[in-house]
Image (cartoon, rainbow, N blue to C red):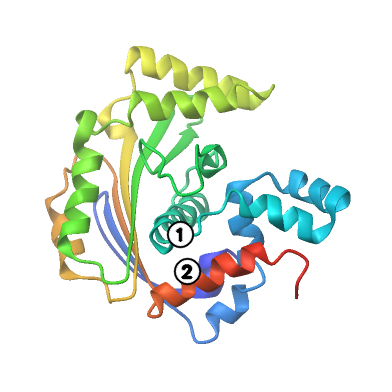
Amino acid sequence: MSLFDEWCECEATQNGRKRLLKYTERQNGRAAIAGRLPNLVRSHYDDMQRVAEDIAALGYAGAAALLAERLPRAARARSGELGEILASELVEQHLGYSVPVRRLRYKDGREMALRGDDFIGVRLGADGELGLLKGEAKSRANLAAAAIAEARAALSRDGGRPTATSLLFVADRLMEVEGHGAQLGRTIRNEVANRAVPAARIDHAIFTLSGNAAPRALEVDLQAAGADRGQTVVHLRIEDHQHFIRVTYEGALAIGIG
């Protein structure tokens, strides 16, 4: 069972290529996935094989100290990055795209936000045609219309296409690995040069995480979004939003405990 299916109830509505997904926690749902969250968060900041090697070489305390150099300490940075992490997981589990690069592994500084699109999904059709998902993530204790408008504005930039810089970042990381990854990286680099993927194969997604119920502004935004591409808006309600984020990061740093 996927993380979100075990954790949450989902209210889904769809109109053509537009869909709204509202997730709320099941009774005891958080407890059911609590054991999975620490490694999930860790995996977005470092390769889990390297973490295992760190444990073997340095012990649990040493491995935790190394990981702590990657994870943010500030509440605001943690909030935003956990939104990106959960968005990437949901995209892969429920939206039919792969998010092939865990971009938080490549941050310049623990508290520094990465530039570019928050998440990019890719998929290849049976005919080898490339499809892309351009996504923005917002995490707020109280989600309001301004944050939603900010996300939509970011999606609309560059003619609705993922930024060239973001695509090249993904392509370059993929091409560092031989095999299918390198081939996909080459395909993405070709797209950056040729801009051949039409709007109909570039979907948009907004992922929101907040303590309040899904605001009406999410539905208004989705209704106004262009119909020339797939549009998905996701809301995940965590009533104790800030407490949940703090505990999640504390759990990720507690290597070998519990």
Above or below 149: residue 100: above
Residue 139 numbered tag = none
User: Which residue is situated farthest in the right direction here?
Assistant: 56
Q: Residue at x 25, y 41 (%)?
A: 155
**3D distance between C-alphas at marks 2 and 1:** 7 Å
Residue bearing the label numbered 1: 78
Residue 184: x and y, percent?
55, 24
Q: Nearer the viewer, residue 217 or 199?
A: 217
Residue 19: x and y, percent?
29, 57
Q: Which residue is drawn at 39% across and 18% down?
A: 191
Tag 2: amino acid: Ile
Give yes or no for contact between labels 2 and 1 (Cβ–Cβ under 8 Å): yes
Above or below 209: residue 110: above
The local secondary structure at tag 1 comes to helix
Q: Which of marks 2 and 1 is nearer the N terminus?
A: 1
Is 35 left or right of 165, judged from the image as shown?
right
Residue 11: x and y, percent?
34, 72
Rate crowding at label 1 as few (under 14), some (14 to 19) or many (20 or more) other CA atoms within 10 Å.
Answer: many
Above or below 69: residue 184: above
Quadrant of the drawing holding the N terminus: bottom right
Is 201 left or right of 44, judged from the image as shown?
left
Residue 245 numbered tag = 2
Is 11 left or right of 30, judged from the image as shown?
left
User: Which residue is situated farthest in the bottom direction here?
Assistant: 27
Tag 1: amino acid: Arg
In the picture, residue 238 is in which quadrant?
bottom left
